[in-house]
Amino acid sequence: AQRVTQPEKLLSVFKGAPVELKCNYSYSGSPELFWYVQYSRQRLQLLLRHISRESIKGFTADLNKGETSFHLKKPFAQEEDSAMYYCALRGNSGNTPLVFGKGTRLSVIA
Amino acid sequence: GAVVSQHPSWVICKSGTSVKIECRSLDFQATTMFWYRQFPKQSLMLMATSNEGSKATYEQGVEKDKFLINHASLTLSTLTVTSAHPEDSSFYICSAIFSSSGNTIYFGEGSWLTVV
């Protein structure tokens, strides 16, 4: 069964502190992993996908197949990073839907 | 980037009536779109996969006769909530696959439905 687990509903950090949003998954095969962000009153936006191996807005995420994790990290949090973050996966066979975790609300305190 | 637009952004309807939500891919063709439902402070729950020119594929537990999905063109999918009840009140989100961009999935802005 496909499953994405985000253990933290809410994460509060001070501005300038490191951030790590946890994501674990279960999937029989090799899924694609994503992080989506939803700012207040805006639509979901793609933040990262593991196959790109890029850094967006200072965020990075490494796929650890051994631990089935795809944690999102940023070394120095900024106030504008406050948002809802969703980890998601899908099969890599083309037109498959995303399966989402429950999301983690990141609150960066000035 | 690719844009997916939903209309209406919010709608209030009376119990027993039907309401239609449109999802359009504005600058690309989408053979596959997905409809999600999101309850307050909860995650997105996949309702169905909408395929252009064929019947939608519904997830387990989603009533296909209640949530009618039509994907008549490569840029438009519609979700019709029939005989709406207050428990159907929710945030409905569509997404579309942009196959020219590595099958990236783009999301609409969502539609708030309130049934009174």
Image: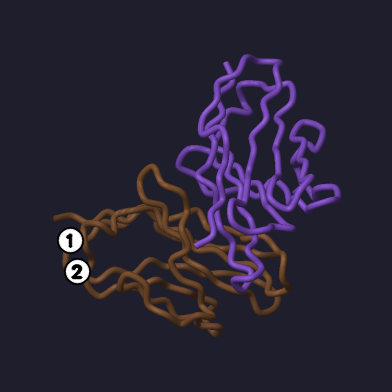
Q: Are marks 1 and 2 in contact (CB under 8 Å)?
A: yes
Residue lying at 18% horizontally and 55% vertically, measured from the top left: A109
Task: Using the image, name the chain to which the residue with label 1 belongs.
Answer: A
Chain B, chosen colour in render: purple
* Marking on residue B41: none
Q: Position of residue A63 (x, y in %)?
A: 50, 80
Q: How is the protein colored in the picture?
A: by chain
Q: How many marks?
A: 2
In the foreground, B8 or B113: B8
* Residue under numbered circle 2: A17
**Camera-nearest residue between A50 and A2:** A50
Write down the residue under mark 1: A14
Q: Which chain is brown?
A: A
Element on which disc 1 rests:
strand
Name the side, left or right, on which B64 lies relative to A102: right
Residue type, label 2: Ala
Helix or strand or loop: what does disc 2 sit on? loop
Q: Is residue B11 left or right of residue B73?
A: left
Location of the C terminus of chain B by quadrant is: top right
**Res. B72 image quadrant:** top right
The amino acid beneath tag 1 is Phe
Q: Residue at point 74% right, 58% down?
A: B31
Badge 2 sits on which subunit?
A
On screen, residue B81 above or below A49: above
